[in-house]
Image (cartoon, rainbow, N blue to C red):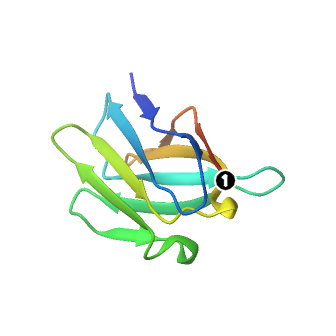
Amino acid sequence: QVQLVESGGGLVQPGGSLRLSCAASGSYFYAMGWYRQAPGKQRELVANITRGGTTNYADSVKGRFTISRDNAKNTVYLQMNSLKPEDSAVYYCNAKTFVRDYWGQGTQVTVSS
């Protein structure tokens, strides 16, 4: 049974930092990553990373966010720096197998003064 357990969301001031974690279990995941969805908007890719370490970022977060992965722990991390109010959203962990995608329950990130 696949499980994704997310942690690390919260409230932060503009310019601040947060670190999200997602621990996955129950299958082989060739890629893991993070998506986000703000109210009234579609879910969008933030960043993802393959088991081999290839990364992909949304243009809006390049240079501010860093994704990393511990393959031994099946855990993916998203270090978010220089946060902006427009980064506020529910962030969802995504884990890809060769059959389907799996999603976490979501964690709220709010950037506000």
Q: Residue furthest left?
A: 72
Q: Quadrant of the N terminus?
A: top left
Percent coordinates x, y for residue 57 in the rendering: 46, 70
Residue at (45, 34) in percent of width and height: 6
Percent coordinates x, y for residue 106 in the rendering: 58, 37
Which residue is identified by label 1? 88
How many numbered circles are shown?
A: 1
Q: Residue furthest right?
A: 40
Return the residue nearer the eye: 107 or 72.
107
Percent coordinates x, y for residue 14 in the rendering: 60, 60
Residue 64 vertical placement versus 3 (above, below): below
Q: Secondary structure at mark 1?
A: loop
Percent coordinates x, y for residue 96 in the rendering: 41, 48
- Give the crowd class for mark 1: few <14, some 14-19, many >=20 residues within 10 Å: many
Kind of residue indicated by mark 1: Ser
Q: Using the rendered view, name the quadrant where residue 5 is placed.
A: top left
Residue at (20, 62) in percent of width and height: 52
Side of 97 relative to 91 (left or right): left
